[in-house]
Structure formats: structure tokens, C-alpha cells
Image (spheres, helix red, strand yellow):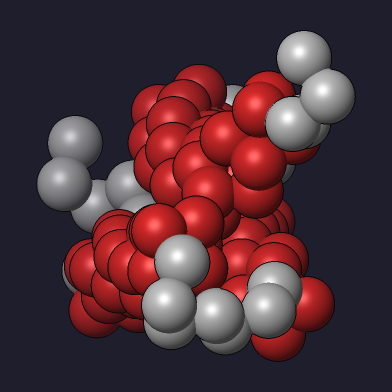
Amino acid sequence: MGDHFFRRLLQGCAPLMVWALHFFGVYVLAEAGCGTAIEPALRWLLPLASVLALAAIASMLLRGRPDGASLLGTASLGSGLLALTGVLWTTLPMLWLPTCGWR
């Protein structure tokens, strides 16, 4: 067990876990916040969550060593780019659509 398997697995999957947490958190916050006292704050809370998720994923990409010759380097780069795309894809409707107007 000296090969640090779980640390390497986390390194390859961490950006996707940040995206999944962002996706779940944004939709739960939007659903729970509409019609409550925090509804006016949702207009800036949701984009702030996206900025924090993008910053976390970008820092993971910059900290990682882009070793294209190894499977871990390729997986880390691929999962980071996929996670960035996922967060941006989740954020676009937040910016264009009304936060609670669809109810």
C-alpha cells in the first residue's frame, strides 16, 4: 500500500467532486431559498458559489503537474477541464434566467 492509491485517486477525481458539490448546492439553495427571506440574496449568492467553484477547480489544475505521459496526469487534466465546463454550463442559466421567476 505504499503507492498512495487513494491520494492519487482523489487527485484525479477532486475537480469532478467540486463540480458535483456545486451542482447539488446551487440547485438546493435555489429551491430552498425561493419564497423565503434569502430570496433577494440569491441573485449574488448563486454566482458567488460558481466563482468559488471555478477558483477551486482552477487552483487544482494549476497545482497539478501536467504530466501528459502518465495516466494520472491525463486523468487530472481531463477531469479538471470537464469540471470547469460543467460549472460554466450550470452557471449560464443562473445569469440569464430570473432566480425565482419561474414559479
Provide residue 2's location: percent of width, then percent of height: 83, 24
Q: Nearer the viewer, residue 31 or 54?
A: 54
What residue is shown at x 77% (from left), y 30% (from top)? Answer: 4
In which quadrant of the rendered image does the N terminus lie? Answer: top right
Please indicate whether residue 88 sits to the left or right of residue 67 in the image. left
In which quadrant of the rendered image does the C terminus lie? Answer: top left
Determine the image quadrant of residue 88: bottom left
Q: Nearer the viewer, residue 40 or 20?
A: 20
What residue is shown at x 39% (from left), y 69% (from top)? Answer: 74
Provide residue 45's location: percent of width, then percent of height: 66, 59
Q: Is residue 69 visible?
A: yes
Please indicate whether residue 92 sits to the left or right of residue 57 in the image. left
Determine the image quadrant of residue 50: bottom right
Provide residue 30's location: percent of width, then percent of height: 45, 39
Q: Is residue 44 visible?
A: no
Q: Looking at this view, name the residue that lies furthest to the right.
A: 2
Q: Nearer the viewer, residue 91 or 61?
A: 61
Provide residue 18's location: percent of width, then percent of height: 57, 47
Please indicate whether residue 89 sits to the left or right of residue 75 in the image. left
Q: Looking at this view, name the residue that lies furthest to the front.
A: 2
